[in-house]
């Protein structure tokens, strides 16, 4: 696998894991009927998601640098 493909795969995996944590912690809401993801109005959940994501990173669940983790979380929560 080329280095570009590997980096893209790592980035995609990071985004999926961050999105799962955001859904689990309540900042995002998954509509199971349509598989659509919506933003929650819970501001505290947004703050807690950053904490949960960085805890997962510290445990080694999510790979990447701190900047990559922050950017992925910000991307998921602000897009």
Image (cartoon, rainbow, N blue to C red):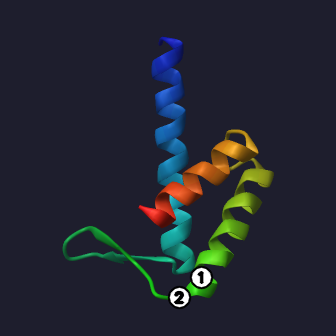
Percent position of residue 75, x then y: 50, 55
Label drawn at residue 22 = none
Q: Residue at x 49, y 18 (%)?
A: 4
Examine the rendered structure and indicate whether residue 43 appears above or below residue 71. Answer: below
- The residue indicated by pointer 2 is 42
Examine the rendered structure and indicate whether residue 42 appears above or below residue 70. Answer: below
- The residue indicated by pointer 1 is 45
Q: Nearer the viewer, residue 12 or 40?
A: 40
Total marks shown come to 2
Percent position of residue 30, x then y: 35, 74
Task: Name the outermost residue toward the right.
Answer: 58
Task: Name the outermost residue toward the front.
Answer: 78
Residue 7: quadrant of the picture: top right
Is any part of residue 62 visible from this angle?
no
Q: Residue at x 73, y 40 (%)?
A: 65
Classify mark 2: helix, strand or loop: loop
Examine the rendered structure and indicate whether residue 9 appears above or below residue 44. Answer: above
Classify mark 1: helix, strand or loop: helix
Labels 1 and 2 touching (C-beta < 8 A): yes
Q: Residue at x 50, y 66 (%)?
A: 77
User: Which quadrant is home to the C terminus?
Assistant: bottom left
Percent position of residue 62, x then y: 65, 48
Is any part of residue 43 visible from this angle?
yes
Percent position of residue 40, x then y: 44, 83
Q: Residue at x 48, y 11 (%)?
A: 2
Mark 1 neighbour density, 10 Å: few (under 14) some (14–19) many (20 or more): some
Mark 2 neighbour density, 10 Å: few (under 14) some (14–19) many (20 or more): few
Examine the rendered structure and indicate whether residue 76 appears above or below residue 12. Answer: below
Residue 17: quadrant of the picture: bottom right
Q: Is residue 55 left or right of residue 47?
A: right
């Amino acid at each position: 696998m080329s280095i570009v493909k590997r980096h893209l795969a790592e980035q995609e995996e990071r985004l999926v894991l961050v999105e799962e944590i955001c859904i689990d912690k309540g900042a995002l809401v998954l509509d199971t009927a349509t598989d659509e993801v919506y933003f929650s109005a819970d501001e505290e959940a947004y703050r807690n998601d950053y904490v949960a994501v960085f805890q997962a990173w510290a445990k080694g669940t999510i790979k990447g640098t701190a900047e990559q983790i922050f950017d992925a979380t910000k991307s998921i929560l602000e897009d």
